[in-house]
Image (spheres, helix red, strand yellow):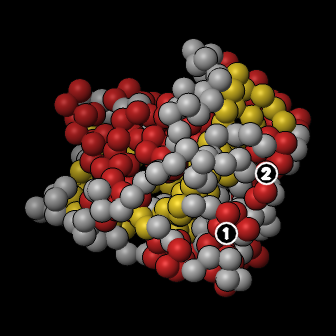
C-alpha cells in the first residue's frame, strides 16, 4: 500500500490537473458509470462536528474508494485543523488496498477544483474580479482554483474577522506572488460581492452571508460551504434571480443542503427551474452559458467520485515516479 501525504501529492499533481480530474469525474457520474451512494454523516455529541463517509466505485476506473472526512469547526479556535480525513483507494480486480492518502488535503484540493471547474466551464471570458467569502481551512485551495481557472486582476477576500482576513490575504499574496491578481481584504461581504465576476462562498454559516441583489449580471457563484439542512450561506433570493442553476449532483444537494432546500420550499425556484448537473453539461447533454448577462449558480456538496478519480490519477503518477512510502 502506497502512503501519500500532501507534499507527495503536490509533487505529481497541480490545480489544473485537479480541475480536469473533476470535470472527468462529473462526466463519469452523469453518464452512470459510477456507484456513488449519498454520504453518510454521523453527528458528534453536543454539535462539536460531523463524521462523514463517502464511498464510490467505478468499473470504468477499475477502482473503488472511500473517504472518511471529519469536520469540526470549533478546532479552528484551538489552532487545529477543522477538516481531518483519509482516502483509501482499492483495486476492483482483487480488492487490494492500493493507497492511503491525505484525505484532508484531497478534500481541499478537489473541492477547490470543483469551483475551478465551474469557472472554467461557465465564467465569462472577460472575468477579471473574483470574490472569496470565507477564510477557513478550504479557502486557500478555493483561491488557488479561482486563479487557475480565470485570468483575474483582483480577488476580494472577506470573512467575519477582518484581522484574520487581512492576515489571510497577506499570506496568500506571498504564496501566489506569481499571479497577476491583487488580493484585497474586505470587511463587508456585500461590498466584496458588488461587481465580482466569479464568487466562491465557503463558510459554515447558518444564514446568508451576502445580499443576492448585489450579485452582478453575468456572475458565476459557487456555493461550497453548506452541506446540511442547517447550513445556509447563499441568499435564497439568488436562486430566483439566477438564469442557470447547476449542481455536482442535484439529488445530493436537494437531500443535504439548505442552500437549495430553502428556495425550493419557499417557492423561489421550482424543480423544473433547476438546470441540471455539471456533468450533464460537460457531456453536451444540457446547455451552458448562452448570454454574457446570465447569472449562474453552481451548488456542490461533494461527491465520492471526485475523490476516487483524483486518487486514482494521483496514485498512478506517484507510482510511476516512485513518490511516497510503500508500506507492507
Give the CA separation, mark 2 to mark 1.
Answer: 14 Å
At a point 39% along the width and 58% down the height, the residue shown is 287
At a point 22% along the width and 39% down the height, the residue shown is 316
Q: Helix, strand or loop at disc 1?
A: helix
At a point 62% along the width and 76% down the height, the residue shown is 269
Q: Is residue 102 visible?
A: no
Residue 306 image position (x, y, % from top left): 38, 55
28, above or below 32, in the image: above
Residue 61 image position (x, y, % from top left): 19, 55
Q: Which quarter of the picture shows residue 21?
A: top left
Q: Is residue 124 visible?
A: yes
At a point 35% along the width and 49% down the height, the residue shown is 23
Q: Which quarter of the picture shows residue 307?
A: bottom left
The residue lying toward the viewer, choosing from 53 and 168, is: 168
Q: Which residue is mark 1?
A: 240
Q: Helix, strand or loop at disc 2?
A: helix
Residue 227 image position (x, y, % from top left): 60, 67
Q: Which quarter of the picture shows residue 243?
A: bottom right
80, above or below 166, in the image: below
Q: Which residue is mark 2?
A: 214
Q: Is residue 96 left or right of residue 78?
A: left
Q: Residues within 10 Å of mark 2 (few under 14, many from 20)?
A: some
**Residue 293 has which mark?**
none
Q: Is residue 160 left or right of residue 251?
A: right
The residue lying toward the viewer, choosing from 61 and 273, is: 273
Q: Is residue 207 left or right of residue 90?
A: right
Q: Earlier in the sequence, mark 2 or mark 1?
A: 2
Q: Residues within 10 Å of mark 1 (few under 14, many from 20)?
A: some
Amino acid at each position: 500500500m502506497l502512503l501519500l501525504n500532501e507534499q507527495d501529492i503536490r509533487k505529481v499533481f497541480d490545480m489544473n490537473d485537479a480541475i480536469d480530474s473533476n470535470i472527468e469525474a462529473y462526466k463519469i457520474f452523469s453518464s452512470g458509470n459510477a456507484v456513488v451512494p449519498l454520504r453518510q454523516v454521523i453527528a458528534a455529541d453536543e454539535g462539536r462536528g460531523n463524521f462523514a463517509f463517502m464511498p464510490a466505485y467505478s468499473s470504468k476506473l477499475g477502482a473503488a474508494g472511500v473517504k472518511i472526512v471529519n469536520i469540526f469547526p470549533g478546532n479552528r479556535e484551538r489552532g487545529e485543523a477543522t477538516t481531518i480525513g483519509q482516502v483509501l483507494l482499492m483495486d476492483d480486480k482483487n480488492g487490494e488496498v492500493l493507497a492511503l492518502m491525505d484525505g484532508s488535503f484531497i478534500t481541499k484540493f478537489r473541492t477547490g477544483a470543483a469551483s475551478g471547474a465551474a469557472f472554467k466551464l461557465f465564467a465569462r471570458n472577460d472575468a477579471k474580479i473574483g470574490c472569496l467569502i470565507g477564510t477557513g481551512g478550504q479557502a486557500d485551495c478555493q483561491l488557488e482554483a479561482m486563479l487557475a481557472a480565470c485570468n483575474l486582476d483582483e480577488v476580494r477576500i472577506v470573512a467575519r474577522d477582518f484581522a484574520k482576513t487581512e492576515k489571510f490575504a497577506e499570506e496568500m499574496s506571498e504564496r501566489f506572488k506569481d499571479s497577476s491578481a491583487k488580493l484585497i481584504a474586505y470587511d463587508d461581504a456585500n461590498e466584496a460581492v458588488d461587481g465580482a465576476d466569479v464568487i466562491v462562498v465557503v463558510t459554515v454559516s447558518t444564514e446568508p452571508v451576502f445580499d443576492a441583489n448585489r450579485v452582478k449580471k453575468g456572475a458565476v457563484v459557487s456555493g461550497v460551504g453548506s452541506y446540511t439542512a442547517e447550513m445556509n450561506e447563499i441568499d435564497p433570493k439568488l436562486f430566483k434571480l439566477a438564469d442557470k442553476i447547476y449542481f455536482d449532483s442535484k439529488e445530493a444537494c436537494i437531500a443535504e443542503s439548505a442552500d437549495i432546500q430553502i428556495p425550493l420550499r419557499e417557492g423561489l425556484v421550482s424543480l423544473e427551474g433547476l438546470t441540471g448537473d455539471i456533468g450533464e453539461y460537460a457531456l453536451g447533454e444540457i446547455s451552458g452559458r448562452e448570454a454574457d448577462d446570465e447569472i449562474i449558480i453552481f451548488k456542490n456538496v461533494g461527491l465520492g467520485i471526485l475523490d476516487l478519480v483524483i486518487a486514482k490519477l494521483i496514485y498512478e503518477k506517484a507510482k510511476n515516479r516512485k513518490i511516497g512510502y510503500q508500506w507492507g
